[in-house]
Amino acid sequence: METSIIKIGNSKGLRLSKTILEKYNIRDKVELILEKGQIILKPIASPRKNWEKEFMKMSENGDDKLLMNDVFDDENLEEWI
């Protein structure tokens, strides 16, 4: 696919069609990779997307319990004071 470089203020940029943005799930930002004479645009995934909802489910199911104590029996907290 060929596309034109357009003037944006004092800079230049690429205009991507709505179809391309939707197909590759591109929102507000992309990762720009410079590799072997090529420029690669890669959508930035949101790895923590929906975590809040999933944490709520865990809480409702009682799956949010500690797997191990956060303070050990032999731990000396006085040395940190």
Image: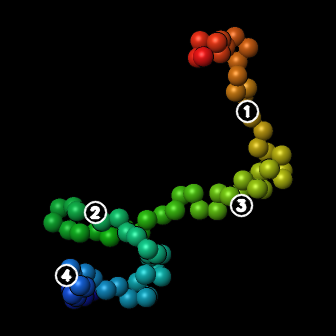
Image location (x, y in percent) of residue 31 = 35, 64
Circle 4 residue: 10
The residue that mark 3 highlights is 53
- Above or below, 52 against 71 in this view is below
Pointers 4 and 3 in contact (C-beta within 8 Å):
no
Which of discs 4 and 2 lies nearer the camera? The answer is 4
Q: Residue at x 37, y 69 (%)?
A: 30
Side of 61 where 45 appears, left or right: left
Tag shown at residue 33:
2
- Label 1 Cα neighbours within 10 Å, binned few <14 / some 14-19 / many ≥20: few
Q: Quadrant of the N terminus?
A: bottom left
Residue drawn at x 23%, y 85% is: 9
Could you give the CA–CA distance between mark 1 and mark 4, rounded to whole angstroms? Answer: 55 Å
C-alpha gap between disc 2 and disc 1: 40 Å
Judged from the image, the secondary structure of the residue bearing numbered disc 4 is loop
Q: Amino acid at mark 2?
A: Ile
Q: Amino acid at mark 3?
A: Lys
Q: CA distance from mark 3 to mark 2?
A: 32 Å
In the image, is residue 66 above or below residue 55? Answer: above
Residue lying at 69% horizontally and 10% vertically, measured from the top left: 74
Determine the secondary structure under disc 1: loop
Instruction: Say if 19 sits above or below 45 in the image.
Output: below
Residue that label 1 marks:
67
- C-alpha gap between disc 3 and disc 1: 21 Å
Label 4 – label 3 distance at C-alpha? 42 Å
SS at mark 2 in the image: strand
Three-letter code, disc 1? Leu
Image quadrant holding the C terminus, namely top right
* Amino acid marked by disc 4: Asn
- Closer to the chain start, of discs 4 and 2, is 4
